[in-house]
Amino acid sequence: MSDKEQKPLPGRRALLSGGAAALGLLVAPGIRLIEVAGASTTASPKVRWGLLVDTTRCTPECKACVNACNAENHLSGATAPTDSQWLRKVELKDKRTGRTASVPVMCQHCAKPACVDVCPTGASFKRADGIVLVDRHACIGCRYCMMACPYKARSFVHAEVHDQNPEVPRGKGCVEGCNLCVHRVDKGQLPTCVEACPNQAMLFGDLNDPNSALSQRLRTIATTQVRADLGLDTGVRYHGI
Amino acid sequence: MSLAAIARTLLLAAGLAGLAGFASADSRVPKPTIQADPANGTCVAPAAEMRRNHMDMLKHQRDKTLREGERGAKVSLNGCISCHAGKQSGSVVGSRQEFCESCHAYAAVKLDCFECHQPKAGAQVAKTAGGER
């Protein structure tokens, strides 16, 4: 920041004699070599955010989570191949028994994400707290991650976007997907799908904290990872499928 | 010198004078419009520093925010927009009158932040689905 500053640096004597020199290396008025960190939060590697979806509480006709996701992230809600879908409801049916289950599917926030492995620019990345994101500044829209993802969780933005949520930038030519409402989670709020569910079928929490409500529930009920055979260690777990 | 030659010389002189007048006029390249809401207090850094370094500050912070999840930092694009959005439009781009666009047009520097980022201040964006076209 200070290397392009137009003002000449004060001399050594001025710097040493200045009482402010002791207070964080003041180079010029308002310019500090070491910026005092503001009241900010950062993603902690001690945390791993996860979700538990209880499909026994999820009804096929309810689309509350999908609608909430579309409203929060200003998605159109259209489901054509060229439209973005971050969260969708998938109906599963056991052909032999006829049992059905309605399953919300989104980015599974894998511990070993295939999308991150294949990304040629490093745009697809996993945050310290386990949330898998796309850095649109680096995304070149090659769509390799869309091919790699076994959950079809990523979408490509085909058209210009105009009415973005100020906290959720979106634009043409980039791949995107569920970000676990990272802007809300960083503020201490729940992902919008979890908050919107009328049947409390979704539980959000820290997988690394054995005392979190999520971990306690995972200890007591049988849960599965979708395509656990791939060994991706998903952050989203399902009950009742 | 014939009458026609005199006329030609006069015409040429008038033309040159006109050209010189046009070049020296300030209106040829309009100066940037600086819009800021003084109710929000002062900027995060002095104007001279912001003019020179705002792109580096924003680029540095975008990686911190996106990749490390740093929130509530001093520098933020939404912070810029909340103070500098135009009073009528509520936006920092869209016409030569708006804060970001006026200066970038003056400096002939392409501005592509707002191909993804929302150029309007938070309260002025309708919270409805259907943003994609």
Image (cartoon, rainbow, N blue to C red):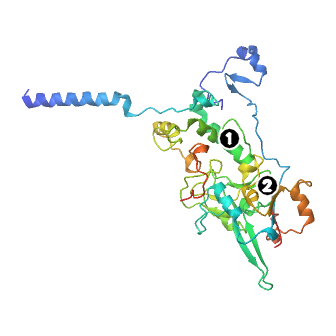
Q: CA distance from mark 1 to mark 2?
A: 21 Å
The spot of residue A230 in percent (x, y) is 80, 69
Q: Quadrant of residue A216?
A: bottom right
Q: Nearer the viewer, residue B88 or A134?
A: B88
Q: Is residue B72 above or below residue A91?
A: above
The residue lying furthest to the front in this view is: A198
Residue on which disc 2 sits: A130
Residue A234 showing in the rendered view: no
Q: Is residue B97 among the parts visible in the rendering?
A: yes
Inspect the image, locate mark 2, and give the three-letter code of the amino acid beneath it: Gly
Residue A159 position within the rendered picture, expressed as x and y whole percent measured from the top left: 54, 59
Q: In the image, is B38 to the left or to the right of A228? A: left
Q: Do the residues at discs 1 and 2 belong to one chain?
A: no
The chain carrying label 1 is B
Looking at the image, which residue is at 70% across and 69% down?
Answer: A89
Residue B9 appears in which quarter of the rendering? top left
Q: Nearer the viewer, residue A15 or A75?
A: A75
Between A121 and A193, the one lying in front of the other is: A193
The amino acid sitting under disc 1 is Gln
Q: Are marks 1 and 2 in contact (CB under 8 Å)?
A: no
Badge 2 crowding class, 10 Å Cα cut-off, few under 14, some 14 to 19, many 20 or more, is many
Secondary structure, mark 1, is helix
Which residue: 86% across, 68% down?
A223
Residue located beneath label 1 in the image? B61
